[in-house]
Image (cartoon, helix red, strand yellow):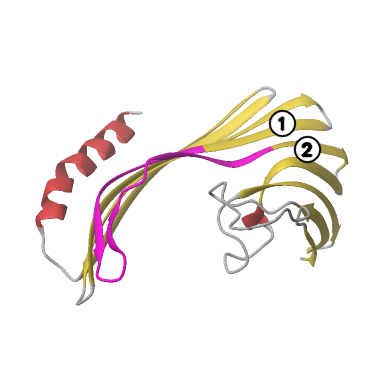
């Protein structure tokens, strides 16, 4: 615990010096992480502090970003668990661009995942709830959002080789409540299958 306090203090003391240095693009990130396993409840948390100072001919940005992530798993029964992963993000600074004007920093509470996980066999898992889409999809397809979804996973392990099949059906959501539609549309769905 003393190490985390010393690390946090060194980050705080180096922050004014970091923000005062002019540069074309600077990024500095510090991360602290802790894992804990206590009976039916296990979890880990991660805290990061980063700063960005960038500028070019059309934009400039100076932002300090603090993020706290929690991953918790509570086993209700040996084969049934609740997976809850919230995050808190606090930003301070400003970003300005010729194209979009001035943007302000965002402070928000995020839900990375909130799901019930049923694992009757060690090779089969069924999950339902607000599922993290970046677990099985690339960032090119979806952003870091949790979609209401149901997912089944089948893992096969043989002498040093592990393979699996993942099937998922989700309802895509967005970070805003606006759908930019002029008439009522049917509920969209994202159905996917992957081998790993």
Q: Position of residue 124 (x, y in %)?
A: 87, 47
Residue 116 rendering spot, x and y as whole percentages: 76, 35
Quick one: SS at disc 2? strand
Total labels: the figure holds: 2
Which image quadrant is residue 5 in?
Answer: top left
Instruction: Give neighbour class at mark 2: few <14, some 14-19, many 20+ (Cα, 10 Å).
Output: many
Relative to 4, is 141 on the left or the right?
right
Q: Is residue 159 left or right of residue 104?
A: right
Res 63 label? none
Quarter containing the N terminus: top left
| 123, 12: nearer the viewer | 12
Q: Is there a contact, CB below 8 Å, between mark 1 and mark 2?
A: yes
Q: Is label 1 in a helix, a strand or a loop?
A: strand
Magenta highlight on residue 105: yes
Q: Residue at x 84, y 39 (%)?
A: 119
- Specify the segment rendered in magenta: 87-114
């Amino acid at each position: 615990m003393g190490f985390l306090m010393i690390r946090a203090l060194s980050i705080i003391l180096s922050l004014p010096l970091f923000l005062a240095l002019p540069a074309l693009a600077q990024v500095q990130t510090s991360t602290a992480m802790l894992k804990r396993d206590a009976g039916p409840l296990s979890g880990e948390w991660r805290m990061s502090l980063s700063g960005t100072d960038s500028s070019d001919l059309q934009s400039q940005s100076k932002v300090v970003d603090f993020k706290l992530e929690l991953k918790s798993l509570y086993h209700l029964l040996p084969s049934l668990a609740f997976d809850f992963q919230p995050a808190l993000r606090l930003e301070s600074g400003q970003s300005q661009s010729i194209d979009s004007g001035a943007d302000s920093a965002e402070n928000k509470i995020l839900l990375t995942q909130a799901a019930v996980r049923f694992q009757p066999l060690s090779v089969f898992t069924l999950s339902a709830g607000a599922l993290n889409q970046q677990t099985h999809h690339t960032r090119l397809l979806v952003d870091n959002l949790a979609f209401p979804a149901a997912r089944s996973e089948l893992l096969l392990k043989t002498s040093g080789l592990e393979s699996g099949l993942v099937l998922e059906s989700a309802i895509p959501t967005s970070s805003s409540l606006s759908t930019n539609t002029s008439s009522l549309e049917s509920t969209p769905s994202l159905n996917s299958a992957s081998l790993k």
